Amino acid sequence: MKQILIFSIFILFVSSIKSLESEVKETCKGGKVSFGKCQCPLGTYLFGNECLKYKMCLPGLMRVGNECVRKKDCPLETIPFGNNCIRVPNRKTTRRRLPVPKPVIYLYPEKPMDISVQLNLKNSIFTTIYPKFNEKNTWNVHAKPNGDIILNNRTYPYLFWEASSYDVPSSNEGFIVTEENAEKFLEEKLEILGLNEKERTDFIVYWLPLLLKNKLSLCAFQTKTFLDNFELNITPKPDTLIRVYLAIKKLDSPINVKEQKLESVERKGYTAIEWGGINMQNNSFK
């Protein structure tokens, strides 16, 4: 009786394999069906249930997936290897990525309108996006004059992103900020740069605790770094675009630094604001 049961189970197993192979055989293109799976010959790879030939790349190019790209276009955290880009998670490097926490984007059109906001990073990778944007790094939103941003029937006060960057900020000029004058420093400088009361409050609530914790800091606004490495394209184009990016470095003792001159910014018409910052931690300015 036991042998009959085992034999029956074996027959059912073989039948199910044959049935599965029959189903796969109908869709397996360019390969052979084995144990219910589509097996591809050498020099090809499985895409869905079809065996495709690997694309051969010309000298000076490498294959990423099934596309040929220039070697210098190898994605971050990968290196050229033969005709491919391979990931090397434990590769030692003298370049250390720095976190770029909480840049946020506010929109203030003069009348309700649909706005496209695209963000492209250089030498950096996104770590957090909220709300999510599409595959083209673009938020397509409806914005109101009071600052409300509507996406997928939800209302947001701003668009939020974070990244990890290889670009090191500059400290040729800046400000020495103590624990005692940190709050006044932020209020005064952010007003000069054109942030309104709400935006200043959002910025200060996020960054003041770090300045108080440091007790002594070197602060340098990084307008050029922000513009060059975090490309922001807004359509329709705002009448006024203000981008504030502050690099903060903890100091153990006072240093001499040329005071940075900030130009006063006047807000006119349809306005877009972005602010962000970076905690240099144990990293040095360039």
Image (spheres, helix red, strand yellow):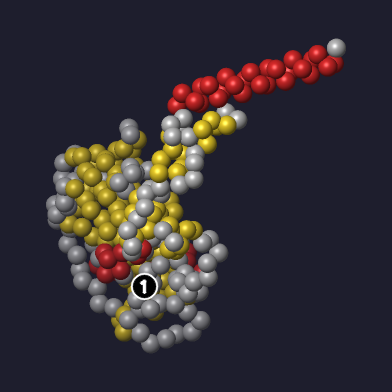
Q: Report the residue that reaches farthest toward the bottom.
A: 256
Q: Residue at x 45, y 47 (%)?
A: 43
**Of the pair 233 and 45, the residue shown nearer to us:** 45
Which of these two is toward me, 278 or 209?
A: 278
**Number of numbered discs visible in the structure rendering:** 1
Residue 129 vertical placement versus 193 (above, below): above
Identify residue for label 1. 169
Image location (x, y in percent) of residue 222: 31, 70
Tell me the quadrant of the picture where the C terminus can be found: bottom left
Q: Looking at this rendering, what residue extends furthest in the right direction? A: 1
- Observer able to see residue 99: no
Is 62 left or right of 241, judged from the image as shown? right
Q: Position of residue 107 (x, y in %)?
A: 25, 48
The part of the image, by quadrant, that contains residue 152 is top left
- The residue lying at 17 percent from left, 57 percent from top is 240
Of 128 and 124, which appears nearest the observer? 124
Toward the viewer: 27 or 133? 27
**Where in the figure is residue 117, as x and y percent of width and height?**
26, 48
Circle 1 crowding by C-alpha within 10 Å: few under 14, some 14–19, many from 20: many
Does the rendering let one see residue 116? yes
Reply above or below: 202 against 150. Answer: below
Task: Report x, y in % for residue 113.
Answer: 18, 40
Position of the N terminus, as image quadrant, is top right
Q: Within the image, what quadrant is residue 37 found in?
A: top right
- Residue sitting at x 50%, y 26%: 24
| Tag 1 secondary structure | loop
Left or right of residue 93: residue 52: left
Q: Residue at (35%, 78%) from the top-left corner?
A: 171
> Looking at the rendering, which quadrant does residue 268 occupy?
bottom left
The amino acid type found where label 1 is placed reads Pro
